[in-house]
Image (cartoon, rainbow, N blue to C red):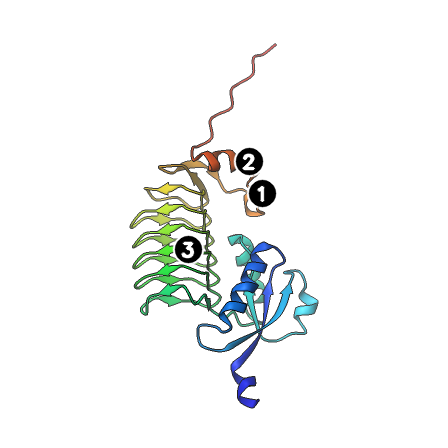
Amino acid sequence: MATGSRTSLPTWVLGNGGQARETADLISVCGHDRGGRALEMRGLVDRDDEPRLSEETGALVLGIGLPQVRARVYERFAGAFEFPVVVHPTAVVGASSHLAQGVVISAGCVVTTDVTLGPGTLLNPRVGVGHDSVLGRCCVVNPGANISGGVHLGDEVLVGSGATVLQGLRIGDGAVVGAGAVVTRDVPPGVVVVGVPARPLGRRTDSTEAGDMSRHLPQIRSGSPAKPARPQDES
């Protein structure tokens, strides 16, 4: 029993939505962190439930799908809790790659050689990350996206489902790559790009950070930039 108490880690998933439930399932499947310690799943907690968390010890795993929110929560609790690295058993991670604390890698991901994943970064299912790529702090890469070799994602970048970032490109801090986009050139910080090839749609706004992408959805679904509104005739 004494040995078990030293090698197991009480673990809470921070979040209360679908991403949190998926993360809890991932922990249940893994059963341990990348260092081999057993993760004792204790349940979900909301990011505003600080009084409850102040009474707990152990580890937190971020169950939040928005990069900017992940970053704020990570900064808020990093001094009080450990953030373990969780890798699904079907994921492939190159031996020379570096995973910072709080990284979560889901089922079917492939992270190849000499990749660096920054603190709090989330790879959703079936993501590919090529050799020598660097993903910054609290990036979120959604299902089926492909990050080619030598790519640099800044902090808090969101890459949509099925998107592709071609080799050697740089995506600036806080940028958003729409679902299904093919990025063929560098993306400045805070810019939203969509389409094939990807073109700027605008800048990430406070509503984008809060998760309200509704004004972008028609363009993201169609894979083309927004067309300017037609001016109304003056009466």
Seen in the image, is 40 located left or right of residue 127? right
Which residue is identified by label 1? Answer: 212
Q: Amino acid at mark 2?
A: Arg
Q: CA distance from mark 1 to mark 3?
A: 25 Å
Quarter in which the C terminus is drawn: top right
Q: CA distance from mark 2 to mark 1?
A: 8 Å
Seen in the image, is 42 located left or right of residue 203? right
Quarter in which the N terminus is drawn: bottom right
- On the image, the x and y values in percent for residue 219 come to 48, 34
Q: Which one is in front in this view, the residue at disc 1 or the one at disc 3?
A: 3
Q: At 63% across and 64% down in the image, what residue appears?
A: 44
Query: In the rendered structure, are the residues bearing label 2 and label 1 in contact, judged by CB atoms less than 8 Å apart?
Result: yes
Q: Residue 49 lies in what quarter of the image?
A: bottom right
Residue 169 showing in the rendered view: yes
Q: CA distance from mark 2 to mark 3?
A: 27 Å
In front: 64, or 76? 64
Q: Amino acid at mark 1?
A: Asp
Which residue is identified by label 2? Answer: 215
Sequence order check: which comes first, mark 2 or mark 3? 3
Q: Residue 55 lies in what quarter of the image?
A: bottom right
Q: At 30% across and 63% down in the image, what residue appears?
A: 113
Q: Which one is in front in this view, the residue at disc 2 or the one at disc 3?
A: 3
Q: Amino acid at mark 3?
A: Arg
In the rendered view, tell whether residue 166 sits above or below residue 77.
above
- On the image, the x and y values in percent for residue 220 come to 47, 37
Q: At 51% across and 23% down in the image, what residue appears?
A: 229
Q: Residues within 10 Å of mark 3 (few under 14, many from 20)?
A: many
Q: Which label belongs to residue 126? A: 3
- On the image, the x and y values in percent for residue 40 come to 57, 75
